[in-house]
Image (tube, grey):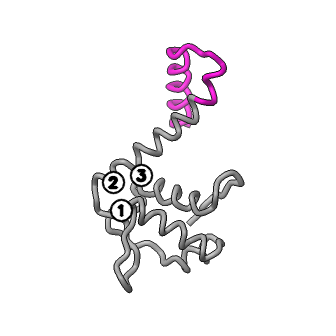
């Protein structure tokens, strides 16, 4: 597990985002067991309480479920899983649009720039 923390967002939310990204790209599959809270804390060098808070948040969002005395697992609810990728993409687009809106770039020009950059970076 390689989580790159930033100084802007709470650590527990960054852990949640890490799991969402892994779900979105298929590295974590429905029903897969995830590390215990203590194991996660040790692996990525965070406070166990922070790991607990991240897991609580993921449970509230329905991303994981935990049955008594069993490891936590990624949800098998397809509705929730399909929304994970969509939510991450929407968040990225909103951040991007907010940052470029003040430049007043015409939408067509902006889309062409995005298409070119996305294609060039994929081929590199």
Q: Residues within 10 Å of mark 3 (few under 14, many from 20)?
A: many
Tell me if 44 is positioned left or right of 79 in this view.
right
Residue position marked by numbered label 3 in the rendering: 24
Q: Are marks 3 and 1 in contact (CB under 8 Å)?
A: no
Let me know if residue 99 is in the magenta part: yes
Residue interval drawn in magenta = 98-124
Image height of 49 relative to 26, above or below: below
Give the percent coordinates (x, y) of residue 7: 71, 54
Calculate the distance from the C-alpha at mark 3 to the C-alpha at mark 2.
11 Å
> Could you tell which of marks 1 and 2 lies nearer the N-terminus?
1
Give the percent coordinates (x, y) of residue 36: 48, 78
Q: Tag 3, which secondary structure?
A: helix
Q: Residues within 10 Å of mark 2 (few under 14, many from 20)?
A: few
Image height of 109 relative to 34, above or below: above
Dominant SS in magenta? helix
Residue position marked by numbered label 2 in the rendering: 80
Let me know if residue 114 is in the magenta part: yes
Q: Nearer the viewer, mark 1 or mark 2?
A: 2
Give the percent coordinates (x, y) of residue 32: 36, 69
Give the percent coordinates (x, y) of residue 102: 65, 21
Residue position marked by numbered label 1 in the rendering: 29
> Could you tell which of marks 3 and 1 lies nearer the N-terminus?
3
Which residue occupies the extreme front position in the image?
Answer: 60
């Amino acid at each position: 597990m390689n989580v790159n923390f930033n100084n802007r967002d709470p650590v527990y939310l960054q852990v949640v985002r890490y799991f969402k990204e892994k779900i979105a790209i298929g590295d974590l599959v429905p029903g897969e067991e995830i590390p215990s809270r203590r194991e996660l804390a040790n692996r990525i060098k965070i406070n166990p309480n922070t790991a607990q808070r991240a897991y609580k948040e993921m449970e509230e969002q329905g991303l994981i479920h935990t049955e008594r005395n069993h490891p936590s697992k990624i949800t098998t609810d397809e509705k929730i899983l399909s929304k994970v990728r969509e939510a991450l993409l929407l968040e990225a687009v909103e951040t991007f649009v907010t940052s470029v809106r003040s430049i007043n770039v015409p939408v067509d020009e902006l889309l062409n720039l995005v298409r070119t950059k996305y294609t060039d970076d994929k081929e590199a």
